[in-house]
């Protein structure tokens, strides 16, 4: 049994208990916490989330967690971002009034347009959809057990647009709009989709992320 400390960051938004259940299922000893000291003492972090970017950043600031998250990622500790948790890693959002994000990864958060190439786009994007390889091989990543064009579960109205495409691990196409659906840059891994809601293949992402980072 590992004695590594994994903290699921609780900033009062989102799918904490489904993430905790996924961790339990694959053998990750994870604790849900909004305590700054827990985060600073963690070996790895999971940043989940569902909802508005502005509310997410405001909550992280109120809880005094922004500098703690940045300190851990700058020190090379693994971080796994999920849905809103992925978006908060970026520089800023186009969401009205949102302003700056954690700026751990350079890029912006954009909203799906209401129309694209003369066709109406249904927003939010709530569906199972395919993820496919972008700029990086999946060997030695959390996706090692997945096949290209694997279906994952999405629910979101905004998506990330990294400044550099080199960090993009997968892309997904929705109504003709190709967007970044996961990133991998050094110790930072994040998905726009919800692995914990994506069946056995989704659970394999948790397991392999933990294995790669010696957390289980």
Image (cartoon, helix red, strand yellow):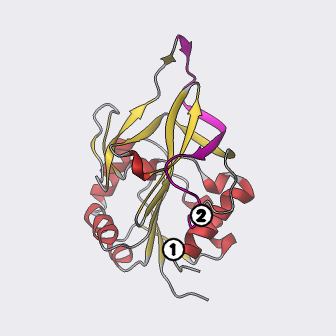
Residue 120 on the magenta segment: yes
Residue 27 occupies quadrant? bottom right
**Which residue lies under the disc numbered 1?**
31
Whether 183 is drawn above or below 29: the answer is: above
- Residue at the spot x=33%, y=56% of the render? 60
Q: Which residues are magenta?
A: 118-141
Q: Which mark is residue 51?
A: none
Mark 2 to mark 1 CA distance (whole Å): 28 Å
Task: Please tell me which residue is depicted at 33% across the width and 71% down the height of the picture.
Answer: 72
Of 153 and 163, nearer the camera is 163
Mark 1 Cα within 10 Å, few/some/many (few <14, many 20+)? some
- Give the residue pinned by disc 2: 139
- The crowd level at tag 2 (other Cα within 10 Å; few <14, some 14-19, many 20+) is few
Magenta highlight on residue 119? yes
Of 184 and 95, the residue lying toward us: 184
Q: Quadrant of residue 160?
A: top left
**Residue at 40% of width from left, 50% of height from top?**
166
- Say if 41 sits above or below 152 in the image: below
Q: Quadrant of the C terminus?
A: bottom right
Give coordinates of residue 33: x percent, y percent: 44, 69
Q: Looking at the figure, which quarter contains the N terminus?
A: bottom right
């Amino acid at each position: 049994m590992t004695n590594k400390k994994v903290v699921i960051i609780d900033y009062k938004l989102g799918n904490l208990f489904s993430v905790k259940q996924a961790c339990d299922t694959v053998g990750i000893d994870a604790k849900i916490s909004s305590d700054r000291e827990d985060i600073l003492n963690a070996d790895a972090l999971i940043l989940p989330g569902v909802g508005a970017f502005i509310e997410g950043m405001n909550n992280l600031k109120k809880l005094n967690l922004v500098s703690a998250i940045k300190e851990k990622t700058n020190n090379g500790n693994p971080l796994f971002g999920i849905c809103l948790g992925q978006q908060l890693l970026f520089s800023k959002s186009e969401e009205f009034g949102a302003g700056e994000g954690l700026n751990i990864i350079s890029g912006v958060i954009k909203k799906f347009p209401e129309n694209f190439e003369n066709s109406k786009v249904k927003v939010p994007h709530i569906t199972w959809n395919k993820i496919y390889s972008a700029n990086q091989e999946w060997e030695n990543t959390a996706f090692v057990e997945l096949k290209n064009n694997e279906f994952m579960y999405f629910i979101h109205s905004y998506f990330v647009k990294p400044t550099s495409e080199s960090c993009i691990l997968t892309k997904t196409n929705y109504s003709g709009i190709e967007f970044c659906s996961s990133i991998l840059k050094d110790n930072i891994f994040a998905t726009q989709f919800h692995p914990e809601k994506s069946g056995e293949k989704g659970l394999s992402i948790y397991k392999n992320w933990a294995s790669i980072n010696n957390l289980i």
